[in-house]
Each structure stands twice: as structure tokens, then as C-alpha cells.
Image (cartoon, rainbow, N blue to C red):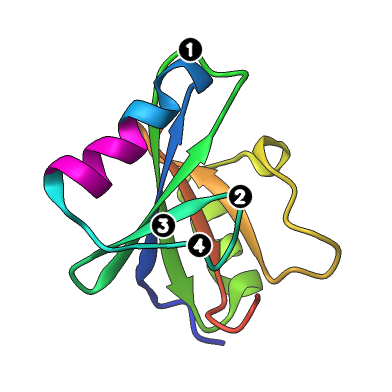
Amino acid sequence: MNTEITGGINIAMKVPSHQYEATIAFYRDVVGLKPFTAKAPAIGFELGPNRLWIDEAPTMSQAEIWLELFTADFKSAANRLAKAGVVRCDAIEPLGEGFRGGWVTNPANIIHLVREPDAW
């Protein structure tokens, strides 16, 4: 079993509805990042070697950043994280039946998706 965990390529910014359009405009029009819509309705932007996804989150009062981590064996990595006292929070956003990954939070309450790279 491989419990190595590495950085992923996706960064999600969950933005309240009242800030959503202005945030999209900021990255597209002010900063000038190249947008893409591969997973509409989410809008993504090329952020160097990473992808910044801007997701509208109507139930949130402030924006949050969610990060992605990769592992070759999610079950083993999940066991490792649990032994370290890492909090699972899979109810935060459904991933679908059979998805090889899960949601965790770091001590500062930043959400991380830990997943096998080919899980989607």
C-alpha cells in the first residue's frame, strides 16, 4: 500500500453568490487569467501549473479555499490520516458512489480533497 500524499492541481474557491460575478470578473478582466468551462457551471482559470475553480456557493457567507491532494491508495492514506487525528468531513460535498477519495480538514479548517488521481 502506498500512503504517500502529494499536492494536486486543483484549487477551489467557494464564493458566496453576492460576490461571485465580481470575483469571476476580477480573475478574468483585472488579472487577465485565461478562463475555461470544462466543468460548467464552475468557471476555472489557468493558474500556472494549477487550475483555480470558482464555484458559486449560495449558502456561504464568506469565501473559502479548498485544496486537492493526490494519493495512489486512498484507503491506506485515509487510515494514515485517521491515525494522525485528521477530521473527515465527507458530508461537505457529495463525491459520488465508488469515488476513491474523501474530504478532510486541516487544523485551520481548510478543506482538502484527498483522492486517487484517476478517481474522476
Q: What kind of element bears circle 3?
A: strand
Q: Which residue is mark 4?
A: 37
Q: Earlier in the sequence, mark 1 or mark 3?
A: 3
Q: Between residue 11 and residue 113, name the one nearer to us.
A: 11
Q: Residue at x 52, y 84 (%)?
A: 72
Question: How would you rate the neighbour count of disc 1 (Cα within 10 Å): few for under 14, some for 14-19, many for 20 or more?
Answer: few
Q: Residue at x 41, y 57 (%)?
A: 44
Q: Is the residue under label 3 in contact with that under label 4 (CB below 8 Å)?
A: yes
Which picture quadrant has residue 54?
Answer: top left
How far is the residue under mark 4 from the one under mark 3?
6 Å
Q: Residue furthest front?
A: 29
Question: How would you rate the neighbour count of disc 2 (Cα within 10 Å): few for under 14, some for 14-19, many for 20 or more?
Answer: few
- Residue type indicated by callout 3: Gly
Q: Between residue 29 and residue 83, name the one nearer to us.
A: 29
Q: Tell me, yes or no, if residue 86 can be seen here.
A: no
- Residue type indicated by callout 2: Pro
Question: How would you rate the neighbour count of disc 3 (Cα within 10 Å): few for under 14, some for 14-19, many for 20 or more?
Answer: many
Between circles 2 and 1, the one closer to the viewer is 2
- Residue type indicated by callout 1: Ser
Q: Which residue is mark 1?
A: 61
